[in-house]
Amino acid sequence: MVSGLSWYAIRTKPRQEERAVENLRSWGIATLAARLKGNDGRRDSQLFPGYIFARFDGLKMLHNVYFTRGVAYVVSFGGAPAPISDDVIGEIYVRMDENGVINNKTCLNPGDEVVIQSGPLRNFVGVFERESGAERVQILLHAVAYSVRVQVSRLEVVKLAV
């Protein structure tokens, strides 16, 4: 367990993300519960349904966090809560607006050149073809004498500047 402030993933009780956030904040704990912009007028949904992030001192506040209403448990590995890198949390924050909503509908049109920003295909450049479900896109990647279509998370793709 890490001493000092660290971010941790918190599994919430079913559909109690907001309750957990509110109760953790009453302890003075910073939280992150990003939402995705609803499509076609639908209600916003959780970016990670059933999970939120909280920043607290694992040695001092873990007991309080475990017994906070709305919290099921702190995600752990090997029996110890697993801290999450500030860089990971930062990547989520930069994609959020002031209301904590990520607009997953970037302005991508068929034929737009894009670059994949994370995962095993990081830094590959391709051509946006179409959306493939609510949160995925299909991209045509070109290599020497070979082309392949891949599906990746919409959050991993950014349009190249013209």
Image (cartoon, rainbow, N blue to C red):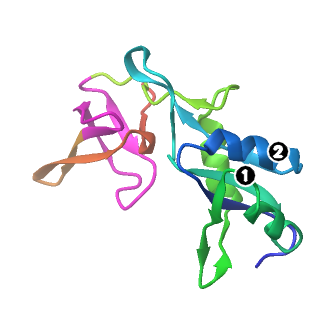
Magenta stretch containing residue 95, yes or no? no
Q: Closest to the observer: 103 or 54?
A: 54
Which label number is shown at residue 44?
none
Q: Amino acid at mark 1?
A: Arg
Q: Image point 45% across, 28% down: which residue?
A: 161
Compared to residue 118, the image places residue 62 above or below, namely below
Q: Image point 27% across, 35% down: which residue?
A: 133
Compared to residue 46, the image places residue 118 above or below, namely below
Q: Closest to the observer: 25 or 130?
A: 25
Q: Earlier in the sequence, mark 1 or mark 2?
A: 2
Q: Residues within 10 Å of mark 1 (few under 14, many from 20)?
A: some
Segment tinted magenta in the rendering: 110-138
The quadrant holding residue 21 is top right
Q: Are marks 1 and 2 in contact (CB under 8 Å)?
A: no
The quadrant of the image that shows the N terminus is bottom right
Q: Image point 51% across, 41% down: which residue?
A: 47
Residue 149: x %, y % from top left = 17, 46
Residue 69: x %, y % from top left = 72, 52
* Residue found at the very far left of the displayed protein: 145
Magenta stretch containing residue 136, yes or no? yes
Q: Closest to the observer: 1 or 129?
A: 1
- Tell me the element at label 1: loop
Q: Is residue 73 left or right of residue 50?
A: right
Residue holding disc 2: 25
Residue 125: x %, y % from top left = 33, 44
Residue 49: x %, y % from top left = 50, 46
**Distance between the Cα atoms at labels 1 and 2?**
12 Å
Q: Amino acid at mark 2?
A: Arg
Residue holding disc 1: 69
Q: Image point 45% across, 48% down: which residue?
A: 117
